[in-house]
Image: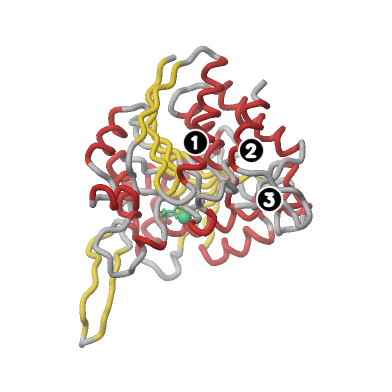
Amino acid sequence: MDAKITLLPGDGIGPEVVDEARKVLTAVANQHNHTLHFTEKLMGGIAIDQTGNPLPEETLGACLENDAVLLGAVGGPKWSDPTAKVRPEQGLLKLRKSLGVFANIRPVKLFPALADASPLRPERVQDVDIVFVRELTGGIYFGQPQGRELVGGLRSGHDTMRYNEMEIKRVLRIAFELAQNRRGKVTSVDKANVLTSSRVWREVAHEVAAQYPDIAFEDVLVDAMAMYLVNRPGDFDVVVTGNMFGDILSDEASMISGSLGMLPSAALGDGGPGLYEPIHGSAPDIAGQGIANPLATILSAAMLLRSSLGLEDEAAQVETAVAQVLAAGHRTADLARPGEKAIGTTEMGDLVVAALG
Ligand code: IPM
Ligand code: MG
C-alpha cells in the first residue's frame, strides 16, 4: 500500500514524540512493503511565530488531501497570554472542524506491566478497558456567541454550550457501534440536572439507545462520573459525552493507565482523513530535553494504521511491541518509580522499533 500522512509536530514535546512515531511507522511499513509518504507542516505556536496563523492554509490543504494526520501537541507559555489575539489552540479547533472529525475515540486501557505506575490500587485498575467517545466539533468549544466585553463596567466573558440533535445522534451512534464489538455497554455522560443542552443530549441519547436493544445503556451525570472513574473504573465499556466533559474526563481517566503520556486518540468523521494525536499536551516544562514519553503518539500511530489505512495486523504489531517494551521493564521518566532507571524519548522509540521483530 501507498499512503500519504501529514505530520504536524507542533510545539513543546510535539516534535520529539512525532519523530519517534514516524520511526515506528516507517519500520512497520517497511516490514510489510508499504510505502508511507510523510509531509511535515507547521501548526500551533510555531506556525504563529513563522506565519502569524496557527493553521496556515498550506497546512490545512495538506491535511485535507492526504490520508491521515498525525499531530504532536500545540501550545505553550509563549503563546498563552490570555489577551492574545491568536492562539495555538485555535488552529487545532479549526483543524478538527475543517476535517469534520466529530468523534474523538480515546481508549483507556492499562498495560499489565504498568499496574503499579497507576496512582489507583492495582486491583481497582487491572480490568479497566474503557473507550471514551468525545464529541469533538461542537458544544461549548464552538458555540456562538462567545466573546468578552465590559458589562456594567466589569470585564466579562461568555461562551455558549449548544448541541443539536444531529450532532448528538451521530456521535451516539459511533458509541453504540463500538459497543457492539466490545462488552455491549454504553454510558452517556451529561449534566442534565442543570443544563438545557444536556437535557436535549439525554433525550436524543435515549432515542438512539432504543435502536440498539442489545446494548446496555445508562446515563450518568458528569460530576458522579468523575467519582466513578476513580472508585469503579472497571464498570465502564464505552463512555460517550460532549466536547468539554470528554476533555476533562479523559485526562482524569488517563491516570488509570499510569501516565497522561500513555493515551492515544483518533478523531474520525464521515470518511475523510482521520486526525490522530496523543491526548497529552505540549509539556513545555520538559520540551527539548529528550525525556518525554513517546508512547501515546506511537499508539496514536497504531490507531492511524488501523482506522485510516485499514492495516489491522500492522496496528496490532505496534501495540504488541509497546506492551513488550513495557513488560521488559523500560520506563520513561513519567512512568519510572523512585529509584527506577528512566530512559529517554529516542531510546524508547528505538526499543519499540526493535520489538517489532
Ligand atoms: C485535548 C486538548 C485540547 C482540547 C486543547 C489543546 C485545545 O486538551 O485534545 O484534550 O481541549 O481539546
Ligand atoms: Mg485535553
- Label 1 or label 3, whichever lies nearer to me, is 1
Residue displayed at 63% across by 52% down: 259
Residue underneath mark 2: 348
The C terminus - image quarter: top right
Kind of residue sitting beneath label 1 = Asp
Picture quarter with the N terminus: top left
- Quadrant of the image occupied by residue 262: top right
Q: Earlier in the sequence, mark 1 or mark 3?
A: 1
Find disc 1 in the rendering and name its residue.
Answer: 19
Q: Nearer the viewer, residue 282 or 341?
A: 341
User: How far apart, in angstroms, are the residues tagged by discs 1 and 2?
Assistant: 12 Å
Q: Is residue 273 left or right of residue 346?
A: left
In the rendered image of this protein, does residue 67 appear above or below residue 328? above
* Residue type indicated by callout 3: Leu
**N-term mark: 3 or 2:** 3
Q: Residue furthest front?
A: 289
Q: Secondary structure at mark 3?
A: loop
Q: Residue furthest top?
A: 33
Residue that mark 3 sits on: 335
